[in-house]
Image (tube, rainbow, N blue to C red):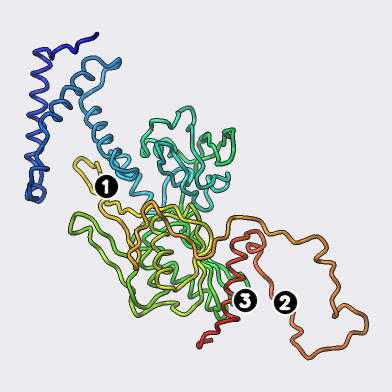
């Protein structure tokens, strides 16, 4: 039977000094934090602080490699935040700068949004037109290794930093896809990721396609410009808003996108412990396209801000939500600058849809479920004979104009094809007053 040895004099002295230092650090907190009402539950657990000091000292004295005080304290902060939820984290100066670059829409890497699920690094979604998307990475792929580093035990931020790098450099990742037994290795070449968040085109005359790959500060303005451009090409009878594999982004941008399609009512609200985390956003009466029939496409890679858009349009009965269940990230993170260019990404609130639904860990359930698939023309269909092909057929008085061409994108995307069919059906059954 082993008996725990008592602390040596030097250890007790170190622990008492560290405890005193921690108390002193707490006393130097900003006045606004100190002014929070205190209850018995808020009292500092002295025994736990002493235990922390003892652990700190034992690592310093006995760990196989020498570790400096700064590294240990920074690791302690990382651990403190990582145990709260998958999205809260401490950011050193380099990580803080990387996060700002991502928000601004330009960074060096492979173009992928990742998250943690039960300690496993997972793909949330690849970003359009990036090495990750071109390599065929999919939502829910588990990332097992990054080059020669196993992801088991890595923090989310550490994994992100490993995937970042100089444009032109190669990175090898090992993934395990759902439904497969064997991992697969993929080699990608990093590039400068300049993400254009909005793309659009006319699928067939009268029906537009609007793709938002992520929500950046300029996304709302880009959506309004795209709608104006499609309307210049002809009357807009319906619109498909594609939010599949959209990992989210800036909250205000999501609000602006919803505001382009609704002219009244609540869009989203948040609830948290602090007063400044209680926010509510409503639509303005001046709206770009309040009358265009809409289908919104979502899937398991649609997260955060994209779920806000889908949830708001669903609750307001403004659009039909089609596809598969979304990711379910309904939490709000605030970026808080600290001293020495460090930063803190901290979960401070939860999102709620206009009807009071929490997105967190639930996601958005589509009104019409359509799984990913491929549309194939049945054998022999093209050879079917029609009256107009018979020799000597009688002429009718109908429109003899050629059938309107449809974008190849529809042929190659079963979910998009179903969305377009639904829009056409909505126009047949429910014509609008304004044409």
State the separation of the CA atoms marked 3 and 2.
Answer: 10 Å
- Residue 387, given in percent of the width and then of the height, sits at 85, 80
Q: Quadrant of residue 220?
A: bottom left
Q: Residues within 10 Å of mark 2 (few under 14, many from 20)?
A: few
Q: Is residue 58 above or below residue 132?
A: above
Q: Residue at x 74, y 82 (%)?
A: 401
- Residue 43, given in percent of the width and then of the height, sits at 9, 40
Q: Residue furthest front?
A: 1
- Residue 57, given in percent of the width and then of the height, sits at 18, 20
Q: Is residue 392 above or below residue 296?
A: below
For mark 3, give the secondary structure.
Answer: loop
Residue hosting label 3: 205
Q: Quadrant of the N terminus?
A: top left
Q: Is residue 233 above or below residue 300?
A: below
Residue hosting label 1: 346
Whichever of callouts 1 and 3 sits on the residue coming sooner in the sequence is 3
Q: Are marks 1 and 3 in contact (CB under 8 Å)?
A: no
Q: Are marks 1 and 2 in contact (CB under 8 Å)?
A: no
Q: Which mark is residue 218?
A: none
Q: Residue at x 64, y 64 (%)?
A: 410
Left or right of 151, for residue 268? left
Left or right of 346, for residue 138? right
Q: Which mark is residue 403?
A: 2
């Amino acid at each position: 039977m082993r008996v725990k040895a008592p602390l040596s004099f030097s250890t007790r002295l170190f622990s008492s000094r560290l405890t005193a230092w921690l108390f002193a650090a707490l006393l130097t907190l900003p006045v606004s934090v100190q002014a929070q009402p205190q209850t018995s539950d808020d009292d500092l657990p002295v025994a736990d602080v002493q235990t922390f000091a003892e652990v700190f000292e034992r690592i310093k004295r006995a760990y196989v490699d020498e570790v400096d005080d700064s590294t240990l304290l920074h690791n302690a902060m990382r651990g403190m935040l990582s145990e709260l939820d998958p999205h809260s984290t401490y950011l050193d100066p380099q990580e803080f700068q990387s996060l700002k670059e991502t928000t601004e829409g330009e960074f060096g890497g492979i173009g992928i949004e990742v998250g943690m699920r039960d300690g496993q690094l997972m793909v949330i979604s690849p970003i359009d037109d990036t090495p990750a998307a071109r390599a065929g990475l999919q939502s829910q792929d588990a990332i097992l290794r990054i080059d020669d580093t196993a992801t088991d035990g890595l923090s989310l931020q550490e994994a992100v930093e490993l995937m970042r790098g100089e444009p032109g450099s190669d990175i090898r990742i090992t993934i395990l896809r759902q439904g497969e037994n064997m991992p697969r290795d993929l080699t990608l070449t990093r590039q400068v990721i300049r993400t254009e968040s909005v793309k659009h085109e006319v699928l067939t005359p009268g029906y537009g396609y609007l793709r938002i790959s992520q929500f950046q500060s300029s996304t709302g303005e880009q959506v309004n410009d795209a709608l104006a451009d499609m309307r210049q090409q002809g009357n807009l009878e319906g619109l498909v808003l594609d939010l599949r594999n959209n990992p989210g982004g800036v909250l205000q941008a999501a609000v602006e996108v919803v505001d382009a399609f609704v002219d009244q009512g609540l869009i989203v609200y948040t609830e948290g412990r602090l007063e400044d985390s209680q926010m509510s956003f409503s639509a303005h009466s001046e709206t770009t396209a309040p009358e265009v029939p809409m289908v919104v496409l979502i899937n398991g890679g649609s997260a955060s801000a994209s779920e806000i858009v889908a949830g708001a349009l669903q609750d307001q009965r403004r659009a039909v939500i089609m596809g598969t269940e979304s990711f379910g990230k309904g939490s709000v993170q605030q970026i808080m600058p600290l001293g020495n260019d460090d930063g803190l990404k901290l979960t401070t609130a939860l999102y709620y849809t206009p009807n009071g639904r929490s997105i967190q860990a639930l996601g958005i359930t589509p009104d019409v479920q359509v799984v990913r698939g491929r549309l194939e023309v049945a054998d022999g269909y093209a050879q079917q004979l029609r009256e107009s092909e018979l020799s000597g057929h009688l002429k009718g008085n109908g429109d003899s104009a050629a059938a309107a061409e449809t974008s190849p994108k529809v042929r190659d995307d079963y979910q998009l094809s179903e969305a377009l069919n639904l829009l056409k059906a909505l126009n047949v059954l429910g014509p609008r007053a304004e044409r």
